Image (tube, rainbow, N blue to C red):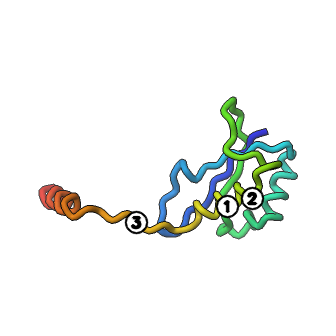
Amino acid sequence: MIYEILVRPSYSKRMTSDHLVWIESDLPTRSFEKWLFEQSLMDGSGRAAIVRWSIVQSQKPAHFKLATQAKALISRITELMSASPELAMPQQELQLKNKSLALA
C-alpha cells in the first residue's frame, strides 16, 4: 500500500507539492498511523511534523519504502521542515523587479 503524507513546512516557507511524500508500506492503515505517532511525527496538537496522511492508489513508485528506508524518510521530513535561507537575488534583477513594480 502507498501512503501519502503532507509534511508541515517551516514558518517561513509555503506549502508546496514538494511537501507531499509517498511511502510504500505493508502496514495496515491503523498500524501506519500508530507508527507515525510512535515516531512523534503526529501528535494531535495541530503542530506536528505531519499535517495529514492518506492512502494513494497509484501505479507510480513511492518515494520511500518504510521497511528499509525509515531513517531516510525521517531525514527528508526534517529537511522539509527546516527553514532554508532565501537565495540572494543579483542586484541587476532586483533593480529590474523594482522598476516593474513601480510601473504597475
Distance Cα–Cα, label 2 vs label 1? 6 Å
Which residue is at 86% across, 46% downward? 27
* 60 versus 37 height, above or below: above
Say which label, 3 or 2, has the lower sequence index. 2
Task: Tell me the distance, in whole angstroms, between the alpha carbons under discs 3 and 2.
Answer: 27 Å
Q: Quadrant of the N terminus?
A: top right
- Check residue 71 in the rendering and tell me which mark sits there, or answer none: 2
Q: Residue at x 70, y 55 (%)?
A: 73
Q: Secondary structure at mark 3?
A: loop
Q: How many marks?
A: 3
Amino acid type shown at disc 2: Lys
User: Mark 1 belongs to which amino acid?
Assistant: Ser
Mark found first going from the N terminus, 1 or 3? 1
Q: Quadrant of the C terminus?
A: bottom left
| Residue 10 place in picture, x, y as percent | 54, 67
CB atoms of marks 1 and 3 within 8 Å? no
Q: Position of residue 72 (x, y in %)?
A: 70, 56
Q: Residues within 10 Å of mark 1 (few under 14, many from 20)?
A: few
Give the residue pinned by disc 3: 86
Residue at 76 percent of width and 67 percent of height: 40
Which residue has dot 1 on it? 75
> Is 41 situated left or right of 67 in this image?
left
Q: Nearer the viewer, mark 3 or mark 2?
A: 2
For residue 9, side relative to residue 41 (left or right): left
Mark 2 and mark 1 in contact? Answer it, CB < 8 Å: yes
For mark 3, does the 10 Å Cα neighbourhood hold few (<14), some (14 to 19), or many (20 or more) residues?
Answer: few
Relative to residue 37, is residue 94 drawn left or right? left
